[in-house]
Image (cartoon, rainbow, N blue to C red):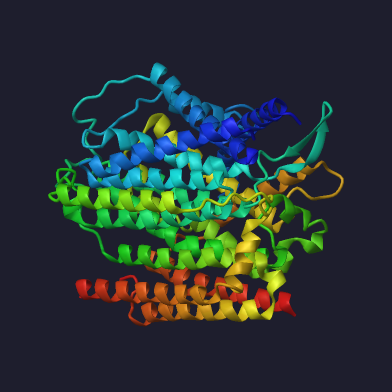
Amino acid sequence: MSEYLAVLVFLGVGIGMVLFTFFLARLIRPAHPYKAKNQSYESAEKPIGDAWVQFNNRFYIFALMFVVFDVEAVFLFPWAVAFGQLGLYALIEMVIFIAVLLFGLLYAWKKGVLKWV
Amino acid sequence: MTATEFAIISSIKVVVVVLAVLTGCAYATWLERKLVGHFQHRIGPNLAGPFGLLQPIADAIKLIFKEDIVPDNAERVTYALAPILMFIPAMLNFAVVPFGDTVTLFGHKIDMVVSDLNIGILFVFAVTSLGVYGIVLAGWSSGSKYSLLGGIRSSAQMISYEVAYGLSIMGVLVIAQTFSLNELVAQQASVWHWFIFRQPVGFVIYVICAIAETNRSPFDLPEAESELVAGYHTEYSSMRFAMFYIGEYANMISVSCVATTLFLGGWQGPFLPPVVWFVIKVIFFMSVYIWIRATLPRLRYDQLMYLGWKVLFPLALLNVMVTSLIVLL
Amino acid sequence: MQTDTVQLVFYLFSFLIIISAIYVVTLKNIFHSAIFLVLTLFGVAGIYILLHAEFLAAVQVLIYVGAVSVLMIFAIMLTTRLASREIKQSNEQVMAGIFICAGFLLASLGSFANTVWRVVDKPLPENNTLTLGQLLMNEYVLPFEVVSIVLLAALIGAIVLARKEGA
């Protein structure tokens, strides 16, 4: 348990570091903002329209596939560690598990979801 | 060891590691500029100090004196949060990496690791999966088209390679049957037991995915400067930009540290002290990183997705299956 | 680690969870709600560690914080209408929400009161991930295989829906 406390301390020191540098930089850097400088960048032109444009919904499918296969990977972790004590039976079980999900990947492949146009 | 002693030793370790990593980041930039310079028949930085060794310090001083520009249509709080979220996960990985063997100092046995978790490897992957937030928040809060496009491209790339990244080390886990990084190092005592020789395919997949995860060339599409200006950190300047920069290098070093621990035998090695071996191996891995950057052209986005989902992911799964079959026999 | 330190950390995490959860439901901007949801899920991982469920804590961060929340943020970012900052989330069914929440609270309080809390006097297994793997492969093999079917169904369903929309 105390090992995790050390991680917490590490997190605290890390955040402290960042905030300290930001604070230090704030003290010594200049600040002369004006309207044109604070415009968002668009190749030296005045920005046209809103920044929040519609995106390709493919990004969403990839995110969803990521969630599904990430869950699969998570199931593999305890399996990998326990594998030595389990033997052939466990291997077969895992092959079935992965085969079912690979079918999903194949389906996505065939439907052309994986193809980026 | 009493609780107070433990607290003091841990705090010292934390501070030492944080400072060492920051120095490492600074000199990683020097190493990269110097190496890329030589790859391109240039000299690289050579004016600030001998061999340009003071260049990182000069860069830091320059950046800290720069004006911090916040665009008017940026969302201030999220905008300020993003660089911190970029930097912290990159940093946190160093909390579990073992840098050397146990040493005795002033009558105390000190492990050269901030905390030896028994889920070490899982911790590394959990923390790595947080890296996407800095990028998403930066892209979203900047209020600029380039930032948003860069942010979403980058995050899609990171999550696409994250699965294969996690699966690439599964072969190692099947052989080693432990999550503890200390134990993984202990199992690689002789060179032939290094996992790079027992898991060559896993190692190659790991390296490719690691480069993609850290958004480095040839997978640096998020900041493809010819089309997206600078990607998700287009609008950032001054210390906030520096934080993204440090975060990128901290990520590179952390990936190199994990690769060293998992595949290159960690701190194990003859004659020299363990910490020196560890640093040598990390520098070697970093040099390979930079070498790849200097050699390969950038991938196209469809090639990137193709490689991630149709090549690396099935290959990593196959690698796990074959490895476990061999372990069984 | 001493018990009072553990308790302090517990209260710290609980505070984090509750505050960020309140923000999730009260903030007007849905993107900010999603970010506070990430914080809530992160706090839950902390609680898992205090319960010695280290594997679960790692999975909580890996799946919920690192994957599911990213999916949600993607969904928010990809829907133009929601992403523009002027659009606020509003809840027109506050009353129904209160009733459902109150019902859920009563149900959970009831089950808390009726559960016999067994205190384990044996030391916890050192490496509970190993035990988890063994259980998954022996005792809970059927649910384990069913999980893959569920995941497959989710994947195919998403592809079918998204393709119809895109075509």
Residue A94 horizontal/vertical position (percent): 57, 76
Q: Is residue B73 above or below residue B201?
A: above
Judged left or right of residue C52, residue A29 is left
* Figure quadrant of the C terminus of chain B: bottom right
Task: Identify the residue at image location x=45%, y=70%.
Answer: B309
Q: Is residue B216 visible?
A: no
B269, above or below B104, in the image: below
Q: Residue furthest top?
A: A27
Report the side of B274 relative to A51 (left or right): right
The N terminus of chain B sits in image quarter: top right
In the displayed structure, does residue C33 sit left or right of residue C12? left
Q: Report the number of numbered marks.
A: 0
Place of residue A76 in the rendered image (x, y in percent of width and height, measured from the top left): 56, 67
- Residue at 34 percent of width and 27 percent of height: B68
Drawn side of residue C31 relative to residue B219, left or right: left
Please identify the residue farthest to the left as the structure is shown: C92
Q: Position of residue C64 (x, y in %)?
A: 42, 55
Comparing B34 with A113, the one in front is A113
Q: Nearer the viewer, residue B88 or B35?
A: B88
Relative height, residue C40 to residue B169 (above, below): above
Q: Nearer the viewer, residue B317 or A38?
A: B317
Q: Can I make out residue B7 in this image?
A: yes
**Residue under the point 42% across and 30% down:** B239
Residue B178: x percent and y percent?
69, 59
